[in-house]
Amino acid sequence: MVTSTNPESEYMDCNDETQVLSIERVFEAEKVPGWREQLTFRAFAVSMLLGVMFSVIVMKLNLTTGIIPSLNVSAGLLGFFFVRMWTKLLERFGALKQPFTRQENTVIQTCVVACCGIAFSGGFGSYLFAMSETIAQQSTEANDAQNIKDPKLGWMIGFLFVVSFLGLFSLVPLRKIMIIDYKLIYPSGTATAHLINSFHTPQGAKLAKKQVKTLGNFFVFSILWGFFQWFYTGGDECGFKAFPTLGLRAFQSKFFFDFSATYVGVGMICPYLVNVSVLLGGILSWGIMWPLIERKKGDWFPADLPSTSLHGLQGYRVFIAISLILGDGLYNFFKVLGRTISAFSTQIQAKRSSSAPLSTETTNPLTNPGVSFDDQRRIELFLKDQIPNSVAFGAYVAIAIVSIITLPHIFHQLKWYHVLLTYIVAPVLAFCNAYGCGLTDWSLAATYGKLAIFSIGAWAGAAHGGVLAGLAACGVMMSIVSTASDLTQDFKTGYMTLASPRSMFISQVIGTSMGCIIAPTIFWLFFKAFKDIGVPGSDYPSPNALVYRNMAILGVEGVSSLPKHCLTLCCIFFAAAVLVNLVRDLVGKKRARFIPLPMAMAIPFYLGSYFAIDMCIGSLILFVWERIDKAKANAFGPAVASGLICGDGLWTLPQSVLALAQVRPPICMKFLSRSANVKVDEFLSKLS
């Protein structure tokens, strides 16, 4: 479950008029470096540094709630800052040989996003960790040895290298169709390009310097705040994260503010509607539904079940959340698929009516007299450094063959013919996802992965490790579809910044290679440092892992394992998710912003509302700031949010090292009711 947004677009409002006038006129006097000159050592050194930092952040978000905001602003801004600092230093010593260009900035952006993207598509908070014994023990079904595979650094790195590159080659032959012929918008890629272009104008450079300073201040504050909080966490349910800000009874129902800088920052980046939807979901579930269902203990489910049993209240929490996610995901899947087919058909008909071929290497869009100066330059350079289609096809087939041979050795439950079918279907789904992403900015990679869980899991069967086979197939499908749409989005960014498609592709390959090593290494650090990772109620409950595993169990064993009336409630919420989405589309954008998002509402059904309160506080801060000074809020709000997220996320590294070194916090700050406090005082007085 990922909530992405486009905070970059807000920057476009506060920059100079070159956003409206010709961008390329501003840079007309500058020589565009060749594709080899765009791939510099300093660019990849900075990319690796930022890739590690953002991978830690994404991993922490994956293992806590699964809500991951867009980090493109932070990547672009920090990439600009570090290389500009590097070049200034070399310039001072007279050793600067190559100036910092927007093309190099785009290479950094692409590499960083590709690297930290593996932390998401690698499934460390979803399908991959769902294979572990920790998650399997939380259900009584399909928790035998053939449906369990615990994380190990070696096989995780090998798995990612085998599956993460196919998506990069699947859509390379269609790059011209997507970017030039069909002129797909790719809102995030376009907004990122505007951001990078603005950094390299005199006015934009000044603004970027101020934004980096703001980000740095809140980055330092966030790290220090995390360090300060650590001192008070010397036991279970200790510290600020267990502060009953709304009272002890509300705390028991997961309603409290846990002083998380990360989720305050996430709330400042995510749209208001997402934050309010999450809070409403928490109120509906933990405030109304779960207390009512708990009263049915002994009737609907046995009263003596442990709190983590999926045959009890926990089952309602997990499976109703799954039904909301599936209802929302499938509705949007068919909606985007319908729009994709409709738009694609319209494009083909338009091509036929004009008697023009769909796309060939010799087609020259520059002959069109309606092409602007900006597009003339962009098209000319975009068509200059081609990636041969034969290379793309050959690489896809070669990697697919290696993968078909290798994957059954990593997961013996996943047969070669399962993998072969996935690789035959994947390019079609990758195109649908990339095309839909270009129209709506909405990637449905997770939804395609869930379809693979059900189809391959059911095909493999319960007796042959269908749960593990479904989860592994989900990883294969998700990796291909996700990386393909990311690359196409990066091609759009490169098109608008005059970065070579070849340098974009190589940067994506290098970033993906970094991610295949960095992401599993960071997950392994988390896994070894925090012993209760994946356990409900812990600091890192990894809620999506339990959701994905139970989807796989449903696909293999059906609905017979659900508690009493759970199937009925699931059907109601599935239908409600579809209906709410339908109403949102029918009433129009103006009214739809007041109707909650079912996917966002589903997240707290299992976790609780504590992070929703953090996010709403972030929204409130931004709302008040916009009321006081909208221009400054638009310019510096994302920088403040990024600083809070990056600082708190990076604090996790020293926290992990302290945990591995068995250094314990010295203080436990705990909150008790008056009656419990009296009992504790009496007990302590007897000891003394």
Image (cartoon, helix red, strand yellow):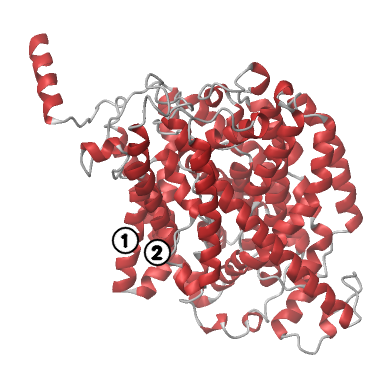
* Residue 406 picture location, percent across and down: 80, 30
Q: Is residue 551 left or right of residue 39?
A: left
Q: Secondary structure at mark 2?
A: helix
Question: Of all residues shown, which one is farthest toward the top?
Answer: 687
Q: Tell me the SS state at disc 1.
A: helix
Is mark 1 in CB contact (under 8 Å) with mark 2?
Answer: no
Nearest to N terminus: mark 1 or mark 2: 1
Q: Which residue type carries mark 2?
A: Gly
* Crowdedness near tag 2: few (<14), some (14–19) or many (≥20) residues, C-alpha within 10 Å: many
The residue under the point 66% across, 34% down is 555
For label 1, the residue is: 620
Q: Where's the C terminus, which quadrant?
A: top left
For residue 340, above or below residue 263: below
For the question of whether residue 168 can be seen, the reply is yes
Which amino acid lies under the numbered mark 1 shown in the image of this protein? Answer: Leu
In this rendering, is residue 475 above or below 271?
above
Q: Nearer the viewer, residue 424 or 41?
A: 424
Q: Nearer the viewer, residue 595 or 628?
A: 595
**Residue positioned 71% across, 47% down in the render:** 510
- Most extreme residue toward the bottom is 369
Q: Position of residue 1 (x, y in %)?
A: 54, 47
How far apart are the two marked residues, 1 and 2, measured between alpha carbons? 12 Å
Crowd band around label 1 with a 10 angstrom C-alpha radius: few (<14), some (14–19), many (20+): some
On screen, 139 above or below 333?
A: above
The picture quadrant where one finds residue 224 is: top left
Residue 631 place in picture, x, y as percent: 38, 75
Q: Residue at x 84, y 38 (%)?
A: 420
Q: Which mark is residue 573?
A: none
Viewer-nearest residue: 545 or 225: 545
- Residue 187 screen position, x and y as percent: 60, 68
Reading the image, the residue beneath label 2 is: 637
Q: Residue at x 45, y 51 (%)?
A: 601
